Amino acid sequence: MVSVIYTFAKSTLAIPWCVGAVALAAGFVLVRQRIRLPLKIVPFVIAVMALGLFAPAMQNDKIEVTLDSFYLRTGLWWSPNEHRFEFRDAVRLEIITIPDVKGRPDRYMRVTLKGGVTDDVPINDLFRSHEDDILNAVTNAFKQPG
């Protein structure tokens, strides 16, 4: 297996860009209308969130699995959430469920490294969209002697 990089599909990445463009256009149209100011501001707020937060964050999300290592990058572009480990340092791999603040179950790939350190890799939207392939690649790389 060579290095495999998983990202969102181009059609999925287009969603926040399209929402932001439509909201921006609607904002410019509403500026010329005789309506209350808060209604004129709402489309611009939506456009800023879609174009400034969601679109860049989704574009930067990636999971990379090589023969030697695993790397996951998610989160906002100025504050990424990264998980990286070498398979030679991993001792154990399991899928766990931890309840979030509201009590809903969140799934994680828990990797126990040499020395007893654990890394709980979140199974987020990007991970879920390629979950079978990623887990197969990780378990195959994990099992290989090295």
Image (spheres, rainbow, N blue to C red):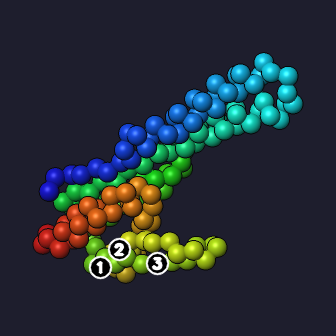
Mark drawn on residue 97: 3
Name the residue located 43 percent from the left edge and 71 percent from the top edge: 108
Please state which of residues 142 and 98 is positioned toward the viewer in this rendering.
Answer: 98
Q: Which residue is mark 1?
A: 92
Please state which of residues 124 and 86 is positioned toward the viewer in this rendering.
Answer: 124
Please state which of residues 32 and 68 is positioned toward the viewer in this rendering.
Answer: 32
Q: Are marks 3 and 1 in contact (CB under 8 Å)?
A: no
Q: Are marks 1 and 2 in contact (CB under 8 Å)?
A: yes
Q: Which residue is mark 2?
A: 111
Seen in the image, is 50 located left or right of residue 91?
A: right
For the residue carrying disc 1, how many other residues have a C-alpha within 10 Å: few (<14), some (14-19), or many (20+)? Answer: some
Q: Position of residue 143 (x, y in %)?
A: 17, 74
Outermost residue to the top = 32
Choose top left, top right, bottom left or bottom right for residue 39.
Answer: top right
Could you tell me the amino acid type at mark 2? Val
Could you tell me the amino acid type at mark 3? Thr
Q: Between marks 3 and 2, how big is the CA–CA gap?
A: 13 Å
Task: Give the total number of marks visible in the rendering.
Answer: 3
Seen in the image, is 94 located left or right of residue 41?
A: left
Could you tell me the amino acid type at mark 1? Arg
Answer with mark 1 or mark 2, whichever residue precedes in sequence.
Answer: 1
Q: Position of residue 142 (x, y in %)?
A: 21, 71
Q: Secondary structure at mark 1?
A: strand
Outermost residue to the front = 34
Name the residue located 85 percent from the left edge and 22 percent from the top edge: 34
Q: Secondary structure at mark 2?
A: strand
Q: Between marks 1 and 2, how big is the CA–CA gap?
A: 6 Å
Quadrant of the drawing holding the C terminus? bottom left
Answer with mark 3 or mark 2, whichever residue precedes in sequence.
Answer: 3
Answer with mark 3 or mark 1, whichever residue precedes in sequence.
Answer: 1
